[in-house]
């Protein structure tokens, strides 16, 4: 069901006062019979309003040092006590959510790995996200679309494709997308061998998100003033793709760990 997309997952790590310093999270999970009972609040959970399950992290041992004493749970978002409230982003889109947990019972079998050792599994999960394969696949596709646009578009009677500035910018982005692709393959290869990819995945995450910004910026330059028209309008080139990615690329330097934190890890 997971591979066929019948069950959707989101990640519920961040809290109002625990983002980069995730180990300071305060959501508690207390053992009670065959269950753990969770109380706390998560925030920024992408897509939680459209998903069925969440990966989450909660403190099971308040006596232990920060990274210890945290456990990893699979949380069914339909469980009584879970309240999901969407938070509009700066573009007005509904992507983010707050998740409130009030006496939410999770069966013990839904704990992944050992009790109090969830931090290390969380890092592994994050390294899959940070390998940024989706971001870099999208980068290549975006460059291809810009190439196509330049070939099909004339400005002042001249093809954009003949403009040396446009050609060099696109050539540079093509090179960078290929570099990112090679970085992704390396991380995937290491992960396939069960190796730890902390700094390699972090490097790919920084590179992919910053390349996404360069592509969005160049996309807006090449599509010109009409490039600022939103999708849905007949005037929006490439269905408003670069108008949208210009707005959303800001968050990609924050999602999954900020660029500053990635550089700290590297
Ligand atoms: C598009 C998007 C999607 C997201 N999706 C999810 C999701 O699905 N699930 C989820 O749990 N969370 C999600 N998040 C939240 C994201 O993980 C956090 O926003 C991120 O970890 C940063 O935490 P914070 O916002 O609390 O910022 P803070 O940790 O408060 O950081 C503020 C600033 O200080 C800098 N900073 C902090 N500590 C250091 C340090 N030690 N060294 C250098 N600089 C530092 C940061 O880089 C940042 O610039 C998402 C965020 C975005 C933008």
Image: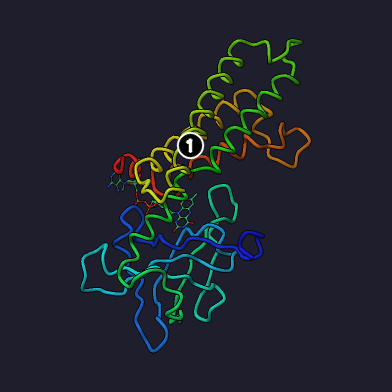
**Image position of 222 with respect to 183: above or below:** above
Which image quadrant for residue 264?
top left
Question: In the image, residue 141 lies at what x, y percent?
Answer: 63, 34
**13 or 251: nearer the eye?**
13
Residue drawn at (43%, 56%) of the image: 125
Image quadrant occupied by the N terminus? bottom right
Left or right of 164 on screen, residue 150:
right
Question: Can residue 219 be seen by looking at this rendering?
Answer: yes
Q: Position of residue 81 (x, y in %)?
A: 49, 80
Side of 200 relative to 178 (left or right): left
Q: Residue at x 27, y 62 (%)?
A: 67
Which residue appears farthest toward the front when viewing the image? Answer: 193
Report helix, strand or loop for mark 1.
helix
Please tell me which residue is depicted at 42% across the width and 86% down the height of the picture. Answer: 34
- Going by the image, does 40 lie left or right of 91? left
Q: Which residue is mark 1?
A: 208
């Amino acid at each position: 069901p997971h591979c066929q997309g019948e069950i959707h997952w989101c990640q519920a790590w961040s809290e109002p006062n625990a983002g980069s310093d995730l180990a300071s999270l305060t959501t508690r999970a207390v053992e009670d019979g065959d269950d753990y009972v969770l109380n706390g609040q998560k925030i920024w959970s992408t897509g939680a309003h459209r998903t069925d399950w969440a990966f989450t992290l909660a403190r099971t041992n308040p006596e232990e040092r920060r990274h210890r004493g945290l456990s990893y749970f699979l949380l069914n978002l339909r469980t009584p006590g879970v309240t999901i409230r969407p938070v509009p982003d700066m573009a007005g889109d509904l992507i983010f959510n707050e998740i409130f947990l009030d006496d939410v019972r999770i069966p013990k079998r839904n704990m992944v790995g050992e009790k109090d050792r969830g931090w290390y599994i969380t890092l592994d999960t994050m390294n899959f996200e940070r390998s940024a394969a989706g971001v870099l696949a999208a980068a290549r596709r975006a460059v291809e679309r810009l190439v196509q646009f330049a070939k099909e578009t004339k400005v002042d009677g001249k093809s954009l494709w003949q403009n040396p500035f446009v050609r060099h910018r696109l050539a540079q982005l093509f090179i960078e997308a290929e570099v990112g692709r090679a970085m992704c393959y390396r991380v995937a290869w290491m992960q396939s061998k069960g190796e730890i990819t902390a700094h390699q995945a972090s490097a790919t995450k920084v590179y992919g998100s910053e390349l996404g910004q360069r592509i969005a910026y160049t996309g807006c330059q090449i599509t010109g003033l009409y490039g600022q028209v939103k999708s849905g309008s007949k005037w929006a080139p490439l269905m408003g793709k670069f108008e949208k990615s210009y707005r959303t690329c800001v968050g990609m330097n924050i999602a999954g760990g900020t660029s500053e934190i990635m550089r700290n890890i590297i």
